[in-house]
């Protein structure tokens, strides 16, 4: 019921504005369920008769994620040659030309292949929003620029991008739950699990990231309430 209410609220936001509305799922790391939640929402929207397309989804070979993609309308990716290899990127112009009501764009912090129209995927998202198309996206907390002094990670998404989001949702798991998902092979392939447990997926690191994600979403909610109160004065 809560998820259906969230979908309905987002639809109402879209219909009140000519510029696309922006919804962001935040999580403390890969594997918490951001992509699955976006795909579940896309299915609900499609069932409700909304023109929703998948602009870009990275399944990482996870069977559960791939199952959720099946049957959803996909915007074909662009094929680019880079350093002798054929690679794929989201086709931003195709999305703009198709003009769906909503597009799902995974991995907001992604860096595009050299030669793309925009260097970063978040810039592609801004272009899509400006075209009047609403976007549902996802990002890991360590990729937010304002946290670069706290998290030792290459930063990719400016704070200002997150501040533009009309809705920010935290996908929360405890550190123990996330580690169990990793051990069960639900995040990475078996040959990568041991290295992940010894590096990024440590209790201390996950606890710190979870705290940051919770604080970030709370801050965005507080600012949104303040803005709505100010607008109502």
Image (cartoon, helix red, strand yellow):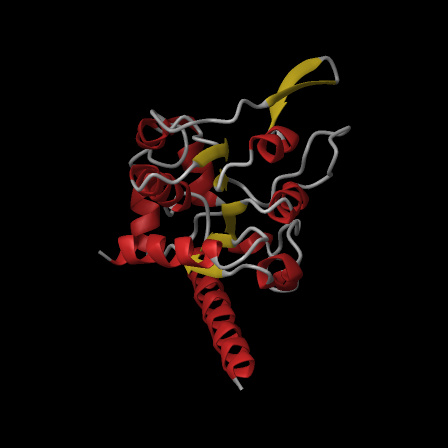
Residue depicted at x 66% and y 44%: 127
Camera sees residue 118 = yes
- The x, y position of residue 85, in whole percent, is 68, 14
- The x, y position of residue 20, in whole percent, is 56, 50
- The x, y position of residue 98, in whole percent, is 56, 30
Q: Is residue 199 left or right of residue 49?
A: right
Q: Quadrant of the N terminus?
A: bottom left
Residue depicted at x 33% and y 35%: 186
Residue found at the very far bottom of the displayed protein: 233
Camera sees residue 175 = no
Q: Quadrant of the C terminus?
A: bottom right
Residue 42: name its quadrant. Answer: top left
Q: Is residue 120 left or right of residue 30?
A: right
Q: Is residue 126 left or right of residue 11?
A: right
- The x, y position of residue 124, in whole percent, is 65, 41
Q: Nearer the viewer, residue 21 or 187?
A: 21
> For the image shown, how many numbered marks are present on the structure?
0
Residue 109: name its quadrant. Answer: top right
Q: Is residue 110 left or right of residue 103?
A: right
Q: Nearer the viewer, residue 192 or 7?
A: 7
In the depicted structure, whether residue 85 falls above or below residue 129: above
In the depicted structure, whether residue 70 falls above or below residue 223: above
Residue 47: name its quadrant. Answer: top left
Residue found at the very far right of the displayed protein: 115
């Amino acid at each position: 019921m809560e998820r259906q209410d969230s979908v309905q609220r987002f639809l109402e936001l879209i219909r009140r504005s000519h510029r696309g509305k922006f919804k962001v799922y935040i999580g403390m790391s890969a594997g918490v369920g951001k992509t699955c939640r976006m795909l579940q929402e896309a299915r609900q929207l499609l069932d409700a008769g909304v023109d929703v397309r998948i602009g870009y989804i990275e399944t990482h070979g996870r069977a559960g994620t791939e199952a959720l993609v099946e049957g959803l309308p996909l915007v074909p990716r662009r094929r680019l040659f880079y350093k002798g290899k054929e690679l794929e990127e989201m086709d931003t112009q195709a999305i703009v030309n198709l003009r769906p009501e909503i597009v799902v764009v995974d991995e907001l912090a992604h860096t595009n292949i050299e030669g793309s129209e925009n260097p970063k995927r978040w810039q592609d998202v801004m272009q899509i929003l400006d075209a009047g198309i609403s976007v549902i996206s996802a990002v890991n907390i360590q990729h937010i620029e304002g946290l670069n002094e706290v998290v030792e990670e290459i930063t990719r998404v400016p704070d200002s991008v997150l501040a533009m989001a009309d809705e920010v949702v935290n996908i929360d798991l405890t550190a123990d739950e996330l580690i169990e998902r990793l051990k069960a092979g639900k995040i990475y392939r078996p040959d990568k699990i041991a290295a992940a447990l010894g590096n990024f997926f440590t209790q201390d690191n996950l606890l710190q990231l979870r705290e940051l994600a919770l604080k970030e979403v709370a801050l965005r909610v507080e600012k949104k309430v303040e803005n709505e109160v100010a607008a109502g004065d």
